[in-house]
Image (cartoon, rainbow, N blue to C red):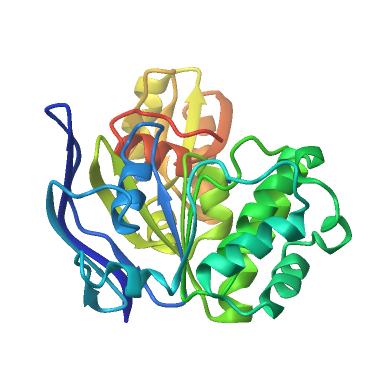
């Protein structure tokens, strides 16, 4: 079952189409990584799914039901969210802040202790939130989204501004939610490395358009393995290697690019070169990185590593 499904989703701001014909497919029980450069349309899309922004065109279905003005609130009862920076009352404690959210959501009071335990804030629940670190505030925001233990959790850039330890902690929390509570998590990020370590399924958006959507391993499968060879005479080496049935493509950096070869074929190639008086200067393995694939998909707009 697809927990979230959009069709032809568009959003126009000031005469500019920020989200274009988006067709998201978020499978049940997955961590769906919504990846794209800053300004690509991630937050706008999530706000439309949550009813915080009205689509210019298109349809949104959540839990298999088409979302309308009439049923939006009933659908969103099973959705938790953390969009942009978490909101809180600084003069209240962490537990008091959660008590307000629990009352508004109509969630069981017992969920507060459980949510605090999950985000590892039990020891700081009586501390005023104004004195929380940024990482603690982010975890408190996640705890608020967990109240009622929704079927779908939507998180917009939850690691923004966190230090490496905080990023790792947030990542571990997100990865544990589907396994422990059967939740589906839709998490956006401009951090390619974070999505790579969290997600089962990834959707990549660029300039408001979805340019890739599939399982993460399918994205990795796009990477290619090659051998790069630099010799004292690449022209002669390329001709000789070609006669051996191996394609050798000259590169701008002075290398010949070969397909990935087994050890025996590499031995034969290097021996043939030496026998023809061509010196082997360097031989190295090259692999198309996930970053290279991302840049290709998004037209060169970088995500952060």
| Nearer to the camera, 290 or 108 | 108
Q: In this rendering, is residue 51 above or below 205?
A: below
Residue at 70 percent across and 46 percent down: it is 137
**Foreground: 105 or 226?**
105
Q: Residue at x 62, y 58 (%)?
A: 142
Which of the 4 image quadrants contains residue 51? bottom left
User: Toward the viewer: 263 or 37?
Assistant: 37
Q: From the image, which quarter does the N terminus lie in? A: bottom left
Q: Looking at the picture, does residue 193 appear above or below residue 24? A: above
Residue occupying image coordinates x 50% and y 17%: 232
Q: In this rendering, does residue 65 appear at all?
A: yes
Q: Foreground residue, 191 or 291?
A: 191
Residue 155 screen position, x and y as percent: 50, 54
From this viewpoint, which residue is outermost toward the right? Answer: 123
Q: Residue at x 73, y 58 (%)?
A: 96
Above or below 140: residue 3: below
Q: Is residue 148 left or right of residue 28?
A: right
Please indicate, yes or no, whether residue 243 appears anywhere in the rendered image. Answer: no
Image quadrant containing the C terminus = top right
Query: Residue 80 location, x and y as percent?
Result: 49, 65
- Residue 156 horizontal side relative to residue 239, left or right: right
Residue 27 percent coordinates (x, y): 36, 73
Q: Would residue 266 appear left or right of 300 to someone viewing this image?
A: right
Q: How many numbered badges does the structure rendering display? A: 0
């Amino acid at each position: 079952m697809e927990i979230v499904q959009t069709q032809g989703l568009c959003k126009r701001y000031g005469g500019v189409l920020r989200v274009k014909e988006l067709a998201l497919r978020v499978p049940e029980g997955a961590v769906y990584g919504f990846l794209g450069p800053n300004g690509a349309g991630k937050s706008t899309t999530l706000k439309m799914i949550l009813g915080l922004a009205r689509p210019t065109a298109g349809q949104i279905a959540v839990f298999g039901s088409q979302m309308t003005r009439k049923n939006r609130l009933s659908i969103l009862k099973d959705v938790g969210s953390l969009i942009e920076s978490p909101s809180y009352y600084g003069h209240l404690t962490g537990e008091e802040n959660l008590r307000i959210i629990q009352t508004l959501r109509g969630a069981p009071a017992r969920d507060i202790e459980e949510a605090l335990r999950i985000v590892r804030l039990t020891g700081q629940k009586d501390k005023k939130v104004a004195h929380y670190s940024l990482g603690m505030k982010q975890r408190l925001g996640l705890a608020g989204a967990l109240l009622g233990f929704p079927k779908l959790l939507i998180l917009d850039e939850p690691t923004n501004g966190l230090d490496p330890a905080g990023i790792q902690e947030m990542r571990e929390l997100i990865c544990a939610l589907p396994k422990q509570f059967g939740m589906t998590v839709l998490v956006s990020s401009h951090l390619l490395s974070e999505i790579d370590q969290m997600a089962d399924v990834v959707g990549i958006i660029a300039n408001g358009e979805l340019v890739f959507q599939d399982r993460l391993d399918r994205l990795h499968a796009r990477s290619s393995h090659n051998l790069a060879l630099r010799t004292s005479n690449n022209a002669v080496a390329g001709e000789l290697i070609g006669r051996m049935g191996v394609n050798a493509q000259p590169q701008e950096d002075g290398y010949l690019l070969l397909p990935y070869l087994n050890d025996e074929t590499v031995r034969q190639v290097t021996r043939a070169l030496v026998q023809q008086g061509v010196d082997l200067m360097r031989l190295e393995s090259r692999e198309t990185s996930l970053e290279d694939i991302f840049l290709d998909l998004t037209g060169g707009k970088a995500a952060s590593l």
